[in-house]
Image (tube, rainbow, N blue to C red):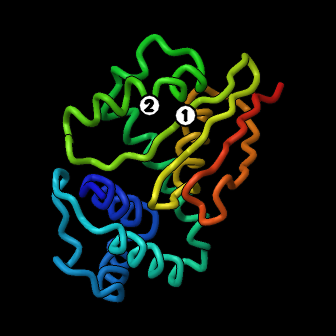
Amino acid sequence: MKGLIFREFLEMVESEYGYETVDTIIQNSEIPRDGVYTSVGTYPHAEMLALLTELSKLTKLSKPRLLFLFGQYVFNVFLRSYPVFFENKTNSFEILSEVEDTIHVEVLKLYPEAELPAFDVQEQSEKEMKMVYQSQRKMADFAEGLISGCAKHFNENITIERECIESDGTVVLFRILKNE
């Protein structure tokens, strides 16, 4: 997992819960490097899970809820850091339909060794999108937070339904409905 994601996670924790919480989760998770991550470095996914577990213990929020909130947070980071992806876009479906073939292509130019999840749009209309998420990291809650953050950016009222295609969470179908 890219260090950029670790850095953003720790920044979110600091902004939401304070530096003391960041320090506590790093100490309690017993991760190497004392929580120092470079944006371009690649680190084991298990370290993120360790940090997330400790944050869940401290906040009493479930790990799925924390991943969802982190996804929303990261969407706003992407919005600020990569505004070109959002130029001339008028709704969330325009962005979501470009994740795999445009956004991930550009991400891989910057980070060729990145192991990105796959997002495959199965169906799309003006009011509904079906998208399959696939990742060995099983972070569908994070992906759902990204989707939610995208809809919020466009002031859209949406409902997100999920169906596990693989029982282990590596493949999930999202059905995104725009509400009136």
Residue toward you, 4 or 83: 4
Q: Residues within 10 Å of mark 2 (few under 14, many from 20)?
A: some
Q: Earlier in the sequence, mark 1 or mark 2?
A: 2
Q: How many marks?
A: 2
For disc 1, the marked residue is 120
Q: Residues within 10 Å of mark 1 (few under 14, many from 20)?
A: some
| Element assignment for label 2 | helix
Q: Quadrant of the C terminus?
A: top right
| Residue located at (72% from left, 38% from top) | 175
Where on the picture, by quarter, is residue 126? top right
User: Is 60 left, or right, of 16 in this rendering?
Assistant: right
The reply to whether discs 1 and 2 touch (Cβ–Cβ < 8 Å) is yes
Residue toward you, 117 or 159: 117
Q: CA distance from mark 1 to mark 2?
A: 7 Å
Image spot of residue 11 (x, y percent): 33, 59
Where on the picture, by quarter, is residue 60? bottom right
What amino acid is found at the position of numbered circle 1 in the picture?
Answer: Asp
Q: Which mark is residue 65?
A: none
| Residue located at (46% from left, 41% from top) | 118
User: Is 160 left, or right, of 31 in this rendering?
Assistant: right
* Above-or-below relation of 18 to 40: below
User: Is 62 left, or right, of 134 in this rendering?
Assistant: right
For disc 2, the marked residue is 100
